[in-house]
Amino acid sequence: MRIIGGKYRGKNLFSPGSDLVRPTSDRAREALFSILRSKLGFDFSSLKLVDVFAGSGAFGLEAMSQGFAEVALVDIDPQPLQKNVRLFSAETARIKVIRADACRLPAAPNAYDVLFMDAPYRKNLSEPALKELAAKGWLKNGALCLIEVHKDELLVLPPFFEQTDERRYGIAKVIFAKFRAV
């Protein structure tokens, strides 16, 4: 597992030592960042990204490498991702690690422009986590949301989320949605 683009391209990351953490593949991350550039432009320097169910932190750290102003990594057990965060000691001001249950979040420290969420497959956690993110102010109006689920998993988006696209990468399906605050 490695950073595939940006300032830290090629930097190796620690692979999770547990079957409970399933990082998004390098190929899928590369494709998703290409899509992000097509939707948001090439300059991410004014954008903030939140990675929920962060696991190894690979997606959020990729975002930091590719120029996002700030990334927040949210996980109920941040210990696996802490090893990878320590590899970026020069970037500590841009990386926030938040220990929290995605279905019982605290009030948001910031509102984020982009959400990446990769809940454990087939546990029905994506919908309640999206509701929680919306209710607790974690997303800016118009935030672009990338929600990874198993390719056969049905995700019913809660109110305020509008699906705009869907892509498949192996066993993963990524649903793109816009958040519309009330």
Image (cartoon, rainbow, N blue to C red):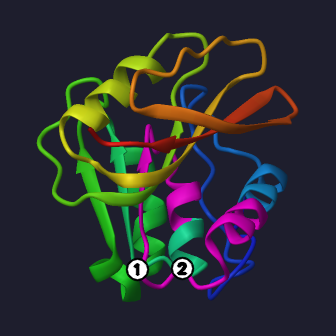
User: What is the secondary structure assignment of the residue under circle 1?
Assistant: loop
- Magenta-colored stretch includes residue 25: no
Compared across the picture, whether 77 is left or right of 59 comes to: left
The residue depicted at 44 percent of the width and 53 percent of the height is 143
- The local crowd at label 2, few if under 14, some if 14 to 19, many if 20 or more residues have their Cα within 10 Å, is some
Quadrant, the C terminus: top left
In the picture of the structure, the residue carrying the numbered disc 1 is: 69
The x, y position of residue 9, in whole percent, is 71, 81
The x, y position of residue 54, in whole percent, is 46, 45
Compared across the picture, whether 26 is left or right of 118 comes to: right
Q: Cα distance, mark 2 to mark 1?
A: 7 Å
The x, y position of residue 127, in whole percent, is 44, 19
The x, y position of residue 140, in whole percent, is 32, 55
Task: Say the numbered circle drawn on residue 48.
Answer: none
The residue depicted at 42 percent of the width and 21 percent of the height is 158
Compared across the picture, whether 136 is left or right of 118 comes to: left
